[in-house]
Amino acid sequence: MSEEEYNDELEPKSKSQIKREMDALQQIGRQLTELKTAQLAEVPISESLKEAIDLYNKVQHKEARRRQMQYIGKLMRAEDEQAIQEVLERFDTSSRAHAQALHQLEAWRERLIEGGNDEITAFVAAHPHVEIQQLRQWVRKAKKDKDTGKNTGAAKKLFQFLREVQESQQD
């Protein structure tokens, strides 16, 4: 523990600091309420927080929603904020992590189209649960499109297939 951390523990937090921390937790809670059900299931949160979020989404009255959001913020104090933030960042399409994941998928798509069976074998090794026959089929169609100069959308469908494989692996 550094000296600065030790001093921070000894000094009591100001009311303003506590309020800023609570507002930050409420903001994370607000982001959680905006997630789809499938996405929320991937977030590492307690059952009581999931129930509070479900109730928030059901309530229509403005004041009741405000109070429920405060309750969500209170429950957030007991949660692992860092782990939740990492998952939320993965869902955020403007985040660097999301962009990096898409670039990796694009690279895989190009490797599969340009390469041969070695690239397919490498992809299967990295993603063992993939349906190999379906992968080979999409790669074959994308190669045919490239060779003939036609665009039937096979490369795009290959990318979508790769994204589904990656998403199913993260579950």
Image (cartoon, grey):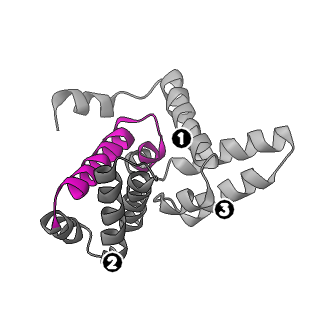
Camera-side residue of 146 and 136: 146
Query: What residue type is disc 2 on?
Result: Gln
**Which residue is tagged 2?**
133
How far from the left and from the top, in percent, is residue 41? 53, 63
Q: What element carries label 2?
A: helix
Point 26% across, 28% down: residue? 7
Camera-side residue of 12 and 63: 63
Residue farthest to the left, as pictured = 118
Camera-side residue of 36 and 122: 122
**Which residue is tagged 3?**
51
How far from the left and from the top, in percent, is residue 131? 35, 76
Q: Is mark 3 on a helix, strand or loop?
A: helix
Q: What stretch is highlighted in magenta?
A: 87-116
Query: What residue type is disc 1 on?
Result: Ile
Quarter of the image where the C terminus is located:
bottom left
Point 44% across, 57% down: residue? 157
